[in-house]
Structures are given as C-alpha cells and as structure tokens.
C-alpha cells in the first residue's frame, strides 16, 4: 500500500510539472544598450537604458518604442511612477518627469544639491 501511494504521488508530481515552470517569455526587447531599470503603469511597461533612452511597451513587452530619445549620455539609472507621472533618475543631469508617457520630459530637480541620482522610489 505504501509503495502504491509513493508511485501515485510521483505520478501526480510529474504530470503537473507544467505548473512549476516560470512564466517568462523572451522578447526582442528594447535595442541600443543595456536595460538598467523598469517601471510600470496600467497597460504600459517602461525600460530605462544605459544609453539614456527610455522605451515603452503597450503590449506586454512584445514591441517597444522610444519614450525618450536620450535624457543623458550617462544613462537612466532608475524609473518610478506616481499616479500618471513617470520619473527618470539620470547620471549627471538629475531627475526628469513626464506626464504624457514620454512625449515630453521636464527637469524635476528643485531642491536637489547633487544631480547624480541613482535610485528613485514612490509610495504609490
């Protein structure tokens, strides 16, 4: 009886291995440099690049388009969202903000004494 239970458990485990695999699917991804960070908004994924560009995808990462051609040649170190705003921390030129999914970016450095920003966070 014990052997039967053991074989039944092994069979159930092996027959359900499909549920144990990760859900990652490789895409072509943004091109041009290394991806340094990600941020999400409902229906959108943003990828910050070492080249200073920001890409966005509205189809779960299958295709990507520019959301910022180049904020800085020193790279985008971090992205974060707050409500409908996207913020980018850059190497050497501070923080930038967009309120229209990357169509226009404005500096957001008021009060910063050092514009080498490596990490952003939001409480949203």
Image (cartoon, rainbow, N blue to C red):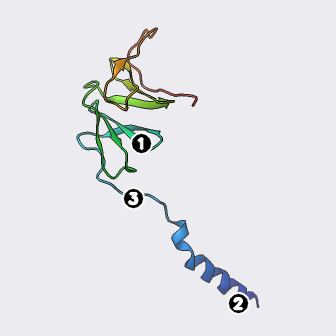
Check the image and name the residue furthest to the front: 100
Q: Which residue carries the number 3 mark?
A: 25
Q: Earlier in the sequence, mark 2 or mark 1?
A: 2
Mark 3 residue crowding within 10 angstroms, few (<14) / some (14–19) / many (20+): few
Relative to 43, say whether 51 is above or below. Answer: above
Asked if the residue at tag 1 contacts the one at tag 2, i.e. Cβ–Cβ closer than 8 Å, the answer is no
User: Viewer-nearest of labels 3 and 1?
Assistant: 1
Relative to 3, say whether 25 is above or below. Answer: above
Tag 1 secondary structure: strand
Q: Which residue carries the number 2 mark?
A: 4
Residue 14: x and y, percent? 56, 78
Q: CA distance from mark 2 to mark 3?
A: 38 Å
Q: Earlier in the sequence, mark 3 or mark 1?
A: 3
Residue 61: x and y, percent? 36, 49
User: Viewer-nearest of labels 2 and 3?
Assistant: 3
Mark 2 residue crowding within 10 angstroms, few (<14) / some (14–19) / many (20+): few
Mark 1 residue crowding within 10 angstroms, few (<14) / some (14–19) / many (20+): some
Q: Is residue 122 left or right of residue 97?
A: right
């Amino acid at each position: 009886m014990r052997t039967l239970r053991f074989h039944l458990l092994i069979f159930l485990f092996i027959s359900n291995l499909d549920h144990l695999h990760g859900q990652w699917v490789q895409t072509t991804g943004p091109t041009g440099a290394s991806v340094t960070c990600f941020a999400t908004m409902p229906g959108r994924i943003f990828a910050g690049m070492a080249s200073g560009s920001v890409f966005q995808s509205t189809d779960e990462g299958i295709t990507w388009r520019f959301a910022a051609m180049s904020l800085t040649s020193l790279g985008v170190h971090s992205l974060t969202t707050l409500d409908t705003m996207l913020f980018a921390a850059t190497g050497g030129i501070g923080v930038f903000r967009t309120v229209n999914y990357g169509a226009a970016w404005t500096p957001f450095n008021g009060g910063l004494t050092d514009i080498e920003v490596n990490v952003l966070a939001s409480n949203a």
